[in-house]
Amino acid sequence: MANAKNNNKEGRSLWLATVHGVGRIKLYAIGVIVVLVIVASAYLVRQCRGNSITAHVNDSIDITPTQVLAMKKIGEWEFLSIEDEEMVDTVRKKLFGTDELIRIYRGTLRLGIDLSEAREDWVAVSGDTLRIVLPRVKLLDDDFIDEARTQPFFESGTWSDQARSDLYHRAKARMKARCLTKENIASAEDNALKQFYQMFKAMGYETVEVRFER
């Protein structure tokens, strides 16, 4: 019994000594780490003393050649459409009476620009200023008469295809004269200027200058 008690005491003492030893090792390791951190921090402070760190933010926006090409590929940009209706007639006199042909033509004239016609340097960036030169406003489609909506109003006698074609071209000329006015062209130009200005302002440019080719 005495031997057993002595063995238990010796085992407990050995276990406590081991725990204490491990504890001292841990404390020593922690102390070493703390010293290393302090030394490293002091070294960094000394190295950085007298130096400054500058952060530069580049907030300039560059429009890429790919974006310019994509816009040119869109081609036609419509800025004003005008619905028109014209009544055109022709009369042919005969020995006994007259023949008459009256037709009503309807169409939509679309005014805008064709960016495929823009010059190579139509977009230029200088600092925070973007300069845009647009091609002139024009009639985008010369075949603006809607044949499906053309109606015969009155017809007497027999008329050839040439007579009907002449009537068609007279209606087209009248529509152009009525719709391609300075006021309508100016309205289309104003819409174009506003839309391109707003589009590029939304891209972040501080100053946007838009004009048409002279």
Image: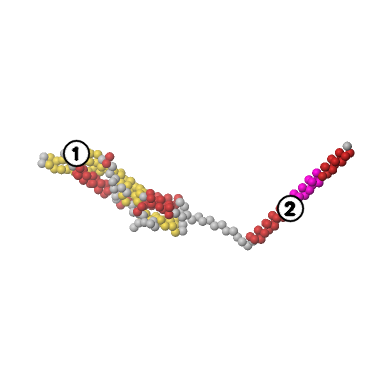
Percent x, y of residue 130: 43, 56
Q: Residue furthest top?
A: 1
Q: Is residue 167 visible?
A: no
* Marks 2 and 1 close (CB-CB < 8 Å): no
**Callout 1 crowding tier (Cα within 10 Å): few <14, some 14–19, many ≥20:** some
Looking at the figure, which quarter contains the N terminus?
A: top right
Q: Which residue is located at x 31 percent, y 47 percent?
A: 141
Question: Is residue 62 located in the magenta-colored stretch of the structure?
Answer: no
- Is 24 displayed left or right of 40 in the figure? right
How are the residues colored? secondary structure
Looking at the figure, which quarter contains the C terminus?
A: bottom left
- Kind of residue at disc 1: Glu
Residue 93 vertical position relative to residue 200 in the rendered view, above or below = above
Bounds of the magenta segment: 15-29
Q: Which residue is located at x 17 percent, y 43 percent?
A: 91
- Which residue was labeled with disc 1? 155
Residue 1 tag number:
none
> Tag 1, which secondary structure?
strand
> Tag 2, which secondary structure?
helix
Q: Which residue is located at x 36 percent, y 50 percent?
A: 75
